[in-house]
Amino acid sequence: MPPRRTRLRCSRIFTLVAVVFLVAAGVKAQTGRVTVQGHVSETVALSVVPNFTHGDADAEVVTSGNTVRLTLRSANAQAPVIRVPLLVRSNSSFKISASVDSTSQLAQLAIADVRATGRLVSPAAINGLNVPEQIDPEVARDLLLVSGPRVSLGGTLDSPTNALQITVLIRLQPQPTHGSLVHLTFAAAPLTQ
């Protein structure tokens, strides 16, 4: 074989060997482990059952994210009783507090009932609730009504099967001369440990 052909063959072999090593090194560099971490922000949403009826008083309800504002009016001389079914959805522990604009009009504020709305409610949601033994309606701001563990196992902020329905009983003071007018604000927030 002439020397030129041998050199040509040798250069092709060296090129082939170099390519094989480079490809192998590139493949080895790509066979590592990738770890992706993320964080979902804590969310607590509060609303009122859509078919909420007001009982013995006229009620205006305004819902916005994690806040429900009620304006209750009653011309009844007796002590009107209103049951407000709040819906709470959360992906973390939560608390619900109340603020009252006119405590002199409020006789009682209590948790009357709690129930799950469907299969996407955590089994621990009801059993893990903390309700104060005595809720003092004389406290005007940030009155803790209830706190508890995560409620929702999935779904969205509008899903019908992932909320805890907490019925708040409100009894107004009898006002024989001019009736009752009360502004109540319920606010839900993540519970910080």
Image (cartoon, grey):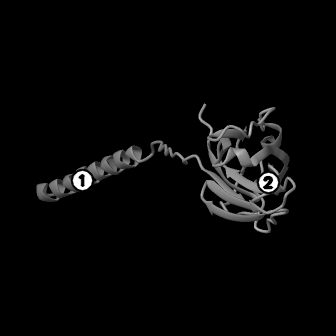
Dividing the picture into quarters, in which one does residue 162 lie? bottom right
Q: Position of residue 34 (x, y in %)?
A: 47, 44
Distance Cα–Cα, label 1 vs label 2: 99 Å
What's the amino acid at mark 2?
Answer: Gln
Q: What residue is drawn where x is 73% and y is 64%?
A: 59
Q: Is residue 94 above or below residue 153?
A: above
Question: Who is closer to the viewer here, 97 or 75?
Answer: 75
| In the depicted structure, whether residue 92 falls above or below residue 185 | above
Q: Mark on residue 128?
A: none
What is the quadrant of residue 80 in the picture?
bottom right
Label located before the other in sequence (1 or 2): 1
145 vs 29, left or right, is right
Q: Is residue 137 visible?
A: yes
| Quadrant holding the C terminus | top right
Q: Position of residue 172 (x, y in %)?
A: 79, 51
Farthest residue in the bottom direction?
51
Check disc 1 and report the residue beneath it.
15
Residue 81 lies, with reference to residue 57, above or below; the image says: above
- Left-right relation of 162 to 44: right
Q: Assess disc 2: are there few (<14), some (14-19) or many (≥20) residues with their C-alpha within 10 Å of its C-alpha.
A: some
Q: Tag 1: residue type? A: Thr
> Residue 175's mark?
2
Residue 126, image x and y in percent?
82, 43
Q: Quadrant of the N terminus?
A: bottom left
**Horizontal arrangement in the rendering, residue 21 relative to residue 51 (left or right):** left
